[in-house]
Amino acid sequence: MIASDEAGKGLSLAEGTGLYRLLVESVKDYAIFVLDPEGRVASWNEGAQRIKGYAPEDIIGKHFSTFYPESDIASRKPWIELEVAARDGRLEDEGWRVRKDGTLFWANVIITALRTNTGELVGFAKVTRDLTERRRSELRAVEAARRIAKAEASNQAKSEFLAAMSHELRTPLNAIGGYAELMELGIGGEITEQQAEYIARIRSSQQHLLGIINSLLNYSRIEAGQVTYEIEPVRLREVANTVMPLLEPQAGAKEITFDKVRCPGNLVALADRTKLEQILLNLLSNAVKFTPSGGRIGVICSESGDRVVIAVSDTGPGVPPDKLDAIFEPFVQIGRNLTSLNEGTGLGLAISRDLARAMGGDLTVESLLGSGSTFMITLPRAEGSPAIGHQANEHGAGPEASNQTLGNQRIADADS
């Protein structure tokens, strides 16, 4: 009998069988072997030896259930698979299999029934692939997805808790502030100088706690995606001139000098003006808080390609190099210890960076320990924007009105 190819040449049956056997025995990436009708191993190729670890003399004649974990043997899985393959002609399965050294590997298995022309079952052909790495990747992906889902659920629960607690705490604090103000006004009768001092301390503590709670509430709103943005062209010089006067009293009390704002009038960002003012107010507040008496604080605006930058520089103590990233994480405050407690929650920079990024920008820092820090707000530049920011002056209002508006907004946030 001759086996012919397309070119008309032929191989004898013996030659063709020899080449086929050579092909099967040489394959290294697949375990290819034959089982007798009872499931005993009748042949063994090089791929089977590489994947399963058995030499031919170690495994030929043994039942193929040797490759299955104890749990599969207890459930008679190997014998059931042969029954299905004999009945249907073929069976495909994936599962854990055991190597000679006892280690497990994830296998894709195909068992094909071998029958004569008369239908007599003479054995089974078995092909096994080692898919352990693929399986591990799948398991890692599933575990990563599970962790992400768990983290998202935890963050959602945390945000809801912070929002609920913030609302619950603000109500009594607002009441405390209201009654303290009534006492200061003498509504319940005259108060002594000592009592007035106590009431002032009560109001100061109430305002401090209210500020912390508002920070927590703002952070929870950002994390929950409940903050909306009105992106429009915003002139950087006007933002700086609006915010800086709000911090002048605190700076003056510490004898800190505010340098003149250096912002070209043609620098316009695409941003939410209120959010940008909030970021700049936070950066300047931090600068005043951490800069020692006699120091200096400055605001400089510049452009870089399609971006604009507002840089807030101070002559404070600076930030350690290993903390430059950490200061933007929630609830982190540099320099807090038992003897020097800096007021606040450690949320200001985290909130500010989230706001900047939500507007298509970023908030970064450069610092030299002992020589001060520079925080940079980077935002998209508004190309070809018309002159803006003069309408208020045309109606008789100027920077003072803008300052009053921002101040009123801070009070409204505290009372809401």
Image (spheres, rainbow, N blue to C red):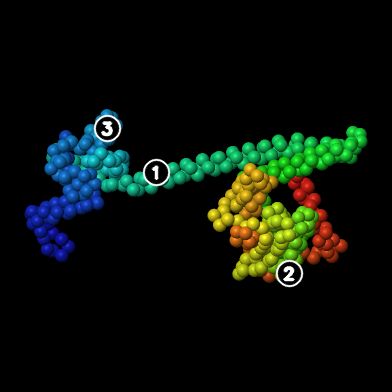
Mark 3 burial class by Cα count in 10 Å: few <14, some 14-19, many 20+: few
Q: Quadrant of residue 102?
A: top left
Which residue in the structure is indicated by mark 3? Answer: 70
Marks 3 and 2 in Cβ contact (< 8 Å): no
Residue 257 makes an appearance in the image:
yes
Residue type pointed to by label 1 = Leu
Mark 3 / mark 1, whichever is N-terminal: 3
Q: Is residue 8 left or right of residue 353?
A: left
Marks 3 and 1 in Cβ contact (< 8 Å): no
Residue 2 makes an appearance in the image:
no
Mark 2 / mark 1, whichever is N-terminal: 1
Labelled disc at residue 139? 1
- Label 1 residue SS: helix
Residue at the spot 63% in from the left edge and 61% down from the top edge? 371
Judge depth for marks 2 and 1 and give the one in front: 2
Q: Residue furthest top?
A: 74
Labelled disc at residue 265? 2
Task: Quadrant for the C terminus, please.
Answer: top right
In this picture, is 240 found above or below 415? below
Query: Residue 108: where, in percent of width, then height?
Result: 29, 44
Residue type pointed to by label 3 = Glu
Task: Quadrant for the N terminus, please.
Answer: bottom left
Query: Residue 39: where, in percent of width, then height?
Result: 18, 36
